[in-house]
Amino acid sequence: MLTLVPLTLLILGVAGASVDSRPKPAKINLTSRKVSRDTLRRRALNPVNLPLANYFNGTDLQWFGEIQVGTPPQNLTVVFDTGSTDLEFPSTACGATCATQKKFDPSKSSTFVDGRRTSTITFGTGVGVDPVIGDNWQLTLRSGTDTVAVGGLVAKSVSLFVITNQSPTFSPDPFDGIQGMGSGAQGFFAGLLEQDLPSLFSLFLTPKAVGNAEMTFGGIDDTKFQGDLVYAPQSSDDGATWQLQSTGISVNGKTTEVLNQPRSFIFDSGTSNMVLTKTDAEAVYALISPDIKPNNAEPGTYGIACNRISSLPAELSFTFTSQQGQPFNLTIPSSELSVGPFRSNPSLCQTLINADEFTLLGASVLKHYYSVWDIGNQRMGFAPTGKPASSRAL
Ligand SMILES: *[C@@H]1O[C@H](CO)[C@@H](O)[C@H](O)[C@H]1NC(C)=O
Ligand SMILES: *[C@@H]1O[C@H](CO)[C@@H](O)[C@H](O)[C@H]1NC(C)=O
Ligand SMILES: *[C@@H]1O[C@H](CO)[C@@H](O)[C@H](O)[C@H]1NC(C)=O
Ligand SMILES: *[C@@H]1O[C@H](CO)[C@@H](O)[C@H](O)[C@H]1NC(C)=O
C-alpha cells in the first residue's frame, strides 16, 4: 500500500495542546554516531529471518508475517509495506469493519501507553489490484506506544497506531495490520537499529506456487538468490518512499520515444501489480496488443478477453543504473500480464498496469528478484531468485 495523503492529526481532549504536524521519520545518522562505552559493551543484534504467508486471490496480493505487541505479547500479522511508514493494527475498539481481523487489546498490555491523538491515513494503492477511488482505503487511528517484537528482536516504546475503524475494503484481509518499511527507518525498525541491528532488510516475495517467502531483518539471506546483488542508489530523499531512477521501459525488447525516457519508480512491496501514468500505460499496452482497452466500469484499469491473454507476449523490462554506472534490467515476465477476471465482467481479464498520477513497481517485479532495502546506504539491491541453495552447484 502506498501512503499518498499525509497523516492529519487531531489532538483529543487535552486542553491547550497544539496540533501536531506529521511525525518526522527518525533518520539514523550512521556515520556520525558517537560510540559510547555502553555501545561497545552491548552485543549487536543478529539478523533474523521471518517466514511470510501469501495472500492469494486470483493473483499474489500481499505477503505478511507475525509480530508480537505488548506485555505479555499479543500475536498479530502485518504486511511489511515499503510504500508506507507507520505501524497500524486493529484494536478491540474497532467494531464490525474489523470483525475478521485479530484485535490488540491495549488494556491487557502493561507497557501500552495511549498517545490520545486520533488521525486518519489514506492509501493511494489498496490491498488488491483495483485502483483506489477517493478514500475507499482509509484507516481511522489512535496513537500509542508499546513493545514490539519480530522473530525474537524486541524494540521498546515503539510509536504505533491502533485502528479504531477501517474502510470495509480492508475487511476480507487475512492479515491484521500493516508495518510501514519506508526508506527512513521508522518505529519498530528504528528501535532495532538503535540496538545496532545492521541497517537494512531483505525481501524474498515468492509466487504462491513457490512458497517459502521470507523477510530478513538486518541482513541478507544469500541462499535465496543466484549470482551477485546489483545495487542502485535511492533517488528520493523524503525519508519515506523507496525510489530508483529508470532510464527507460521496453516491451518484448522494443521501446518507443515515449517509453525510452527517464522516470522515477516507487518500489512498493504492498502493491501487487504496478502503476504508470495513463500516457505510459497506454504506450506499453500498444506494444502488447491493440485490444487491451480501458475498462470504464473500473476507471484506471485495463483489460482484454480472458481467452486471449495467456497467448500474449508481454515481457516488460525496466532499465536502471547501478552504483557502478552500469545499466541493468528488472524484468516482469509475460505470465504476470493477467491479474485475473474483473468482478464486473468475468470474461474480461484485468491487465497488470493501472493508470494513475504516479509511477510504481510492486510485487509483480519484486516476486522475480531477491531485494535488499539498504537504509544505511540509501540504496536497493537486486539479484534474480533461482533454485534453492540445496539444488545449486556449490
Ligand atoms: C549527521 O552526520 C552529518 C555528517 O557527518 C553531521 O554533519 C551531523 O552533525 C550529524 N548529525 C547528528 C545529529 O549527529
Ligand atoms: C476473492 O475475490 C473475490 C472476487 O473479487 C471476492 O468475492 C472474494 O471475497 C475474495 N476472497 C478473499 C478471501 O478475499
Ligand atoms: C504467538 O506466537 C508464538 C510464535 O509464533 C507462539 O509460540 C505463541 O504460542 C503464540 N501465542 C498465542 C497466544 O497465540
Ligand atoms: C534491457 O532490456 C532491453 C529490452 O529487452 C534490452 O534491449 C537491453 O539490452 C537490456 N539491458 C541490459 C543491461 O540487459
Image (spheres, rainbow, N blue to C red):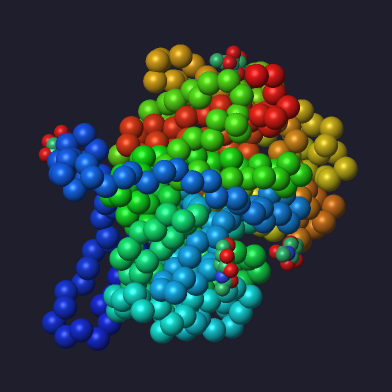
Q: Tell me the residue at 85%/52% (across/down).
A: 347
- Which of 359/326 is in front? 326
Residue in the image at 59% along x and 83% along y: 96
Give the tally of numbered discs.
0
Image x and y of residue 152, in percent:
46, 56
Camera sees residue 317: no
Instruction: Say if residue 207 shows up in the picture.
Output: yes
**Residue at (33%, 44%) from the top-left corner?**
44
Residue in view at x 44 percent, y 68 percent: 69
* Front residue of this view, candidates 45 and 84: 45
Q: Left or right: where does residue 129 sit relative to residue 248?
A: right
Image quarter where ligand 2 lies? bottom right
- On the image, the x and y values in percent for residue 14 come to 20, 84
Image quadrant where residue 287 sits: top right
Q: Position of residue 229 (x, y in %)?
A: 51, 24
Is 326 rendered above or below residue 96?
above
Residue extending farthest to the front is: 41
Q: In the figure, residue 275 lies in which quadrant?
A: top right
Above or below residue 371? Residue 259 is: above
The quarter of the picture where residue 6 lies is bottom left
Query: Which of these two is toward me, 393 or 213?
Result: 393
For the view shown, which residue lies furthest in the right direction? 307
Coordinates of residue 119 in the picture (x, y in percent): 36, 72
Locate the C terminus and report the quarter of the image it occupies: top right
